[in-house]
Each structure stands twice: as structure tokens, then as C-alpha cells.
Image (tube, rainbow, N blue to C red):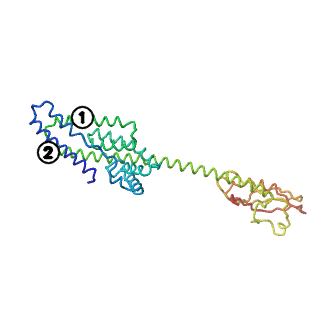
Amino acid sequence: MNSGSRRAVRASVLVLALCAIGACKKEQAADQPGAEQAPAAQQQQAPPQQAVSSQVAAMGVDQLREAANKALSEQRLYAPAGDNAMEYYVALRDKAPTDAAVASALTDLMPYALIAAEQSIARDDLGEAQRLHALMEKVDPQAPALPRLKQGIADAQTTLAQRTAAAEAQTEEEAKRQADLERERLAEQQRAQQQAAQQLAAQQAAEQTAATQRAAEQRAAEQRAAEQRAAEQRQAQQPAAPASPPPAASAPASTSTALRAISTPAPVYPPSALRLEQSGEVLVEFTVDTDGTVTNARVVRATPPRVFDRAAISAVNKWRFQPVASSVTTRRTIAFNPGG
């Protein structure tokens, strides 16, 4: 049993004992008007709650940060007392007041603590409600919900005091019922914390995913722009650079080697392929007429198909060779490399 459960059980035992004492005093002071109401009301006045335990307050910055992260991962958002993420973050904020992540975590946890406090009031667990109120007040003394929560605790204390004063005895069956209620309370608290932790984790994951996606899109856009500028610069600086490595296939060597290139402009890299950083090659067959112009250009083989065909044919049609005695048909392989 953890420390929070032990305190809850001790509180239940104390209430039972005080009820029995109150019943005895009623018999002794039946002739004094109002004597039976005062003790019952006084029983509900718990001492001021300490928002952060002394053990937690004594921990160092690194210890607190590690303990807070562990409590979040184990879904201990605001309970049990002395070992929950909210207390660790409050103590950490006192030691590192400029840490924005700590402030953000406390802001995220406040709604769950408020819901838990209201649920504690509803089930008459006023000690837990007061502890959560003190913790929330430590986080933000100006929180709008605090006055309403404080009034709710006070009203519940009054109502509970009246019910306690009216009760004359607690039977064994009632004690068993209280134990069952305590077990249900702990189970409900655990379920509520699990659900709250899942909601918080989903919210944080969605925010992280969105931020990562935005950063990736920005980097991709910057990279595409840089690549486009580099491609344009290369094309502008090397207008007469050979467009391809030595031919992969050609006409007979004696005919092919007779061709002397005058101008072989590089092909324009297709923008869609450049954005996708696609590379490939195209084997083009063409005829060089006697005046050195290119005719009858066609694609023999392309890898990948139909991506660079048009750019290759357009480039080859612009090539010029020295005049030859008779038309020559040859083949050349044009390579496309976004980084080359």
C-alpha cells in the first residue's frame, strides 16, 4: 500500500473514532442546546494542506526533472501525495523559475487537478480535495477556479459535518461499505489518471508531429530551391559542356569516329524529376546530315521510361557537327544526374 492509500485509510479510521466520541458526548450534554453540532463541525476542519512535501522540496533540479518525467510516464499526474508530476514540477519551478517547459507542463496539468478536486468533493474525500486545492493555489494563486473550488470544499465540509453529527453509530457492515468505497475511489482515481494521461500524451504527440512536419516541409522547400538554383547555375555556366559520357552503342567505329561535334548543348533537366532527385539515362539514335545538322532523333532505350525522353530528344535536335561527306546514323547515351 502506498503512502496516499495509508493516509486515506487512517483518515477513515479517525472519522469513525470521532463519530463514536461525538455520540458519547451527545448523551452527556443532551441538556445543552447545540452541543451535538459543534464537535461534528470541528471534526471536518483539517489542518492546512502542504502543497509540496518537504522531501520533494529538498530534491535537486536534476532529481526533480527526472522524477517529474517518470511520474508522467507512469500516469501519476497529481496523486499520490508526495510522488506525483505536479508536485515535482512545482518544486522544480521554485528552483528554475525561467524554465518555460516547466511552466507549460504545469499549465497542462491544472485542468486535470481541478477535475480530480471536484470529483473528490463529490465523493466526500475532502482531505484529497484540500490537498489538490493547495497544489493548484501553489501553481497559480490567481486561477479563476480556486474561489469556486474553495467554496465547494467549505460547503461539503458543512454538509459532511451535519451528516456526521446526525449519525449515531457505525456498524460493521457500514465499515465494510466504506472500505469498498475506498477501493472504488482508488480504482476510479487510477482510471481517471490513465485517461487524463492518455489525453495529455495524445495532445503533446499531435503538437510534436505538427511541428516536425512543418520543419520537414520547410527544409524540403529550402532544399528544392537550392537544387533549382544550382541546376540553373550549372546550365548557365556550362552551355557547351558535353551532354553525355562516351556512347554506349553506336554505328560502326570507322563511321562514328568521323563525326566531330561543334555544339552539344546540355539537356534541360525536367523540373518534376529535379524535385524528386530522380536520375536516369536515355539512349538516343539520330542521323547527322552532310551539313552537320541532326535529324530523325528517336529514343532507343530510357531508364526510367518516359521521364527524360523529351528533354533528351530536344537537346539532341540542337546539336551541330562538322559537315560530313555523307549522312551518318549513330547513337549516344545522355545521362541525367541531379547532383552531377
Instruction: Name the residue beneath numbered marker 2.
Output: 172
Residue at 40% from the left image edge and 38% from the top image edge: 143
Q: Amino acid at mark 1?
A: Thr
Image quarter where the N terminus lies is bottom left
Taking the spot 77% from the left edge, 62% from the top edge, the residue there is 332
Q: Position of residue 88 (x, y in %)?
A: 38, 51
Position above or below: 308 against 182: below
Query: What residue is shown with label 1?
Result: 158
* Mark 1 neighbour class, 10 Å CA radius: few under 14, some 14 to 19, many 20 or more: some
Q: Position of residue 86 (x, y in %)?
A: 38, 48
**Residue type at numbered disc 2:** Glu
Q: Residues within 10 Å of mark 2 (few under 14, many from 20)?
A: few
Relative side of 138 to 156, left or right: right
| Rendered location of residue 318, percent (x, y) | 82, 55
Residue reaching furthest right? 325
Task: Residue at 13%, 40% (x, y): give it.
Answer: 169
